[in-house]
Image: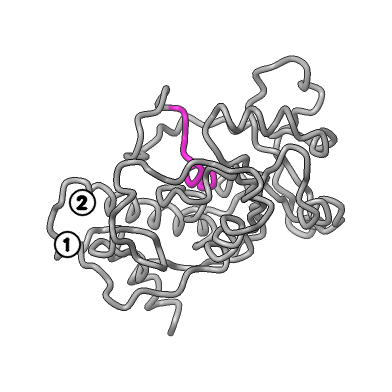
Amino acid sequence: MPADLAAKSPSAFEQEVRRIAASPLRLTHPRREFKARGSFVLRCDGCRMPKTYCICQYRTEVSSNAVFWVLMHTEEVNKPTNTARLIGDTLPETRVFPWFRMQPPEALLALLADPAYQPFIIFPDDQPDYLHRVVEFEPARQGQESRRPAFILLDGTWRQARRMFRKSPWLDHLPVLPLRTNQKTDYRLRKPASEQHLCTAEVGIELLKLAGDTHAAGVLQQYFTVFNQGYGAARHQRPTEELTGAMQWLLDYQASASR
């Protein structure tokens, strides 16, 4: 797995995450520093991977009619393994907002009021008290794309996401879209409670498929695979010389797009 010695600058999404991490508002809600395994590794500034396993050269931007708005728990902002970053790296229109229980992000409230978008909160339909808000997603037919689907991802641990959903009354008027898929997780950096518990990037891939954008879903899938492979190699300190199929796919895609 060859490392890219000329790392790219952080994406706009990643830069915003870092602004959130350094914001005075977050500092008034102190959280523990990132002290998990690998917290002292020397990391690439662009992708936050261990420098020897940098994946910056495989970052590939693609457009989509669907957009993602990531509502990120503030304990996630310093985690280099957070996979919402992969969505932001791939889809440059992706927005990220910090979640504070008592102070909703004004920029997100403005987007929710924008008639150009049809927002959906991605959350399971496993409780009866909000079943009246649960909807099915129906892709717009050609010529009827009046509102762009905006998928709101609650980014945190499962426990944090439930708290964000329950403690955000300013989201209570929005439709809830449960993600129904048979896809099993391939995320290798944690052991999920169930194989059906997808990480944030995998949720993004499935939502793009649901919206009919298999092209963008394919690019994000390949980038997620490279990310997974990179962390797997780093954890086992494997050599970095070999190009994987996903890496070659993204390099070929970049070459064809630049012609």
Q: Main secondary structure of the magenta part?
A: helix
Residue 37 or residue 211, whichever sits in front = 37
Label 2 CA crowd tier, 10 Å (few <14, some 14–19, many 20+): some
Residue 117 or residue 157, whichever sits in front = 157
Report the side of 224 relative to 168 (left or right): left
Magenta region: 196-206
Up the image or down, 33 lies above or below 126; here it is below
**For the C terminus, which image quadrant?**
bottom left
Q: Which residue is pictured at 16% across the width and 46% down the height?
A: 236
**For the N terminus, which image quadrant?**
bottom left
The kind of secondary structure element at disc 2 is: helix
Say if residue 144 shows up in the picture: no
Residue 163 occupies which quadrant of the picture?
top right
Q: Which residue is pictured at 51% across the width and 68% down the height?
A: 11
Label 1 CA crowd tier, 10 Å (few <14, some 14–19, many 20+): some
Residue 50 or residue 34, whichever sits in front = 34
What residue is pinned by disc 1? 240
Could you say which disc has been placed on residue 169 in the image?
none
- Amino acid at the residue labelled 2: Ala
Report the side of 153 relative to 140 (left or right): left
The kind of secondary structure element at disc 1 is: loop
- Amino acid at the residue labelled 1: Thr
Residue 93 or residue 62, whichever sits in front = 93
The residue most toward the bottom is 259
Q: Which residue is pictured at 28% across the width and 55% down the height?
A: 41
Report the side of 87 relative to 114 (left or right): left
Up the image or down, 248 lies above or below 184; here it is below
What residue is pinned by disc 2? 233
Q: Are marks 1 and 2 in contact (CB under 8 Å)?
A: yes
